[in-house]
Image (spheres, grey):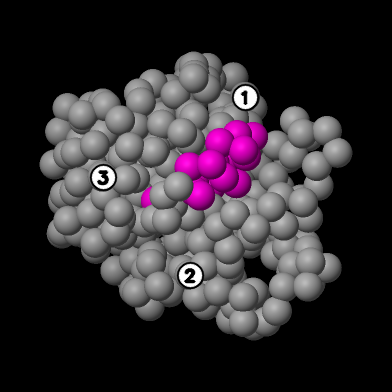
């Protein structure tokens, strides 16, 4: 079965540099220190990391993957990766829309860098998605025929914990229902909520039911199900399919760092779940590749 991955993090050299600048590690090579503490490989360049990702995709027979910059201001790294492998990699970039010049960054990323999706983390950067500054970003994405990724629900950063860096996230900003009016205002704009709403499952289903341009990505271990007594990941898939159907579920793994690489076990588990639910090959193909291709043609 053809497989694409709609959720991979692109931990470029710039990512390590940004983390290193946020701590006092007492070393002349803080980025190397960060990599050592995490047990991750520090790439020599964005281009080298892009090559490694494509090699990883080849090894696991994955056709295309979304690669996401994971700190604001790192869209250049993803743009280099996409430029090097335009048939295999689709560029996503993290944005803090509260910062001055955020709209210019967004328009340049779409128009000049070939990136296809802006990633918003309201709980991380403390804003509501219906804030006028944020709505202007949605408008830019709609005009560029791009997409918007909005992380909702529980947000944690194990990386920051390992490095003893503070994480002043505020989940009050992460309610999927906040997307209701914005999604209705841009009905042709694909809006992706990862991890089935990451704990706000009911709310994600509610807004996706009302707004036909909202998609749910299936990525990560989905450990949020522990907040719902008795719920299993099989149940989450079954309920999501009942509400949004196979045309608006998008497979992802939340793969991120090397040497771990692509998370095969997440793919294997989700195939087994869909088989157990009796989902046919045609609908599975939509979830694992077709919907991705339709959005990121």
Front of the two marks 1 and 2? 2
Q: Does 205 lie within the magenta span?
A: yes
**Residue at horizontal 86 percent and vertical 38 percent from the top:** 230
Point out the image quarter for the C terminus: bottom left
Q: Main secondary structure of the magenta part?
A: helix
**Residue at horizontal 81 percent and vertical 47 percent from the top:** 232
The alpha-carbon separation of the residues under discs 3 and 1 comes to 38 Å
The alpha-carbon separation of the residues under discs 1 and 2 comes to 35 Å
Residue highlighted by disc 3: 185
Secondary structure at numbered mark 2: helix
Residue highlighted by disc 1: 161
Q: Does 96 lie within the magenta span?
A: no
Tell me if 37 is positioned left or right of 78 in this view.
right
- Counting residues from the start of the chain, the first of labels 1 and 2 encountered is 1
Is residue 16 placed above or below 7 in the rendered structure? Answer: above
Please say whether residue 20 is visible from this viewpoint: no
- Classify mark 2: residues with Cα within 10 Å, few (<14), some (14-19) or many (20+): many
Q: Which residues are magenta?
A: 191-209
Please say whether residue 274 is visible from this viewpoint: yes
- Counting residues from the start of the chain, the first of labels 3 and 1 encountered is 1
């Amino acid at each position: 079965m053809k497989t694409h991955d709609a959720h991979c993090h692109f931990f470029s050299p710039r990512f390590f540099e940004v983390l290193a600048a946020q701590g006092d590690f007492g070393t002349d090579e803080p980025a190397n220190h960060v990599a050592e503490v995490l047990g991750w490989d520090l790439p020599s360049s964005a281009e080298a990391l892009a090559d490694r990702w494509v090699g990883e995709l080849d090894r696991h027979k994955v056709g295309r993957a979304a690669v996401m910059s994971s700190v604001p201001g790192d869209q250049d790294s993803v743009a280099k990766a996409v430029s090097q492998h335009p048939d295999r990699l689709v560029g996503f970039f993290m944005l803090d829309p509260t910062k001055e010049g955020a709209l210019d960054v967004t328009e340049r990323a779409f128009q000049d860098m070939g990136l296809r999706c802006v990633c918003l983390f309201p709980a991380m950067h403390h804003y509501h998605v219906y804030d006028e500054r944020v709505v202007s970003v949605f408008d830019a994405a709609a005009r560029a025929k791009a997409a918007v990724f909005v992380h909702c629900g529980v947000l944690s950063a194990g990386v920051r914990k390992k490095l003893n860096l503070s994480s002043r996230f505020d989940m009050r900003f992460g309610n999927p229902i906040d997307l209701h009016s914005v999604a209705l205002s841009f009905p042709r704009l694909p809006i992706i909520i990862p991890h089935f709403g990451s704990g706000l499952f009911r709310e994600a289903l509610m807004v996706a039911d009302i707004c036909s341009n909202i998609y749910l990505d299936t990525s990560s271990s989905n450990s949020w199900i522990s907040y719902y007594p008795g719920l299993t990941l099989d149940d989450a898939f079954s309920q999501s399919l009942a509400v949004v159907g196979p045309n608006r579920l998008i497979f992802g793994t939340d793969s991120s760092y090397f040497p771990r690489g692509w998370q095969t076990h997440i793919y294997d588990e989700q195939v087994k779940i869909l088989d157990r639910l009796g989902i046919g090959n045609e609908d599975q193909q939509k979830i694992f590749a077709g919907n991705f291709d339709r959005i990121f043609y």
